[in-house]
Image (spheres, rainbow, N blue to C red):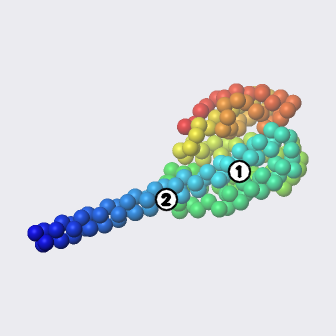
Amino acid sequence: MKKSIIALATALTVLFSANTIQAKTNNSELKAIEIADSQLQSVYDAYFTVKDALIKSDSKLTSAKAKDLLTAISSVKMDKLKSNEHTVWMKVVKKLTADAKSISSTTDLKKQRDTFKSLSKSTYDLIKVSSPDQPIYKQYCPMADADWLSKEKAVKNPYYGSSMLTCGNVVETIK
């Protein structure tokens, strides 16, 4: 009887240890997935702060937020990206960086908004292959003949700010 109890205890210990190892493996895999997801999230978040500064027509704030975007771009670890994201990242990273530098180095609102058109295109190409954690709305302004991305469905135009705040419409929802 004592041998049976010891054998049972040993079997339970082995089983518990195996489950603990499996749980640790699953947690590591989850953390790796979260890291991959967060690699581009900081870039997207910084893009949205640039857009919001343009909506306010605040060129100094736009410049500062573009510097934050540059930091986010340079902190992306390419080896942590999913293969489809990596492919697009390699195509757009130089343009993203150049656009962010251009926006950050001027307080000329017109120049910032012109460059934002290109920045939005590169960000769109990238976000299309990602799995955003919430719906992202591609919006279009016919007056500026330009697109931008937004977390909100309601149109707030970064190309004209308060002078034509609601000019535009949603042309695509990215999920």
Residue occupying image coordinates x 81% and y 30% = 165
Q: Residue furthest right?
A: 108
**Amino acid, disc 1:** Ala
Local packing at callout 2 (Cα closer than 10 Å; few below 14, some 14-19, many 20+) is: few
Location of residue 167 in the rendering, given as x and y in whole percent from the top left corner: 78, 27
Mark 2, secondary structure of its residue: helix
Residue occupying image coordinates x 74% and y 47% = 49
- What quarter of the picture does the N terminus occupy? bottom left
**Amino acid, disc 2:** Lys
81 relative to 157, above or below: below
Is residue 129 visible to us here? no
Dot label at residue 122: none
Dot label at residue 46: 1
Local packing at callout 1 (Cα closer than 10 Å; few below 14, some 14-19, many 20+) is: many
Task: For marks 1 and 2, give the CA distance.
Answer: 23 Å
Mark 1, secondary structure of its residue: helix
Residue occupying image coordinates x 72% and y 54% = 69
38 relative to 164, above or below: below
Residue occupying image coordinates x 67% and y 61% = 74
**Left or right, 117 with reference to 10:** right
Q: Are marks 1 and 2 in contact (CB under 8 Å)?
A: no
Location of residue 25 in the rendering, given as x and y in whole percent from the top left corner: 39, 62
Instruction: Provide the residue designation for mark 2.
Output: 31
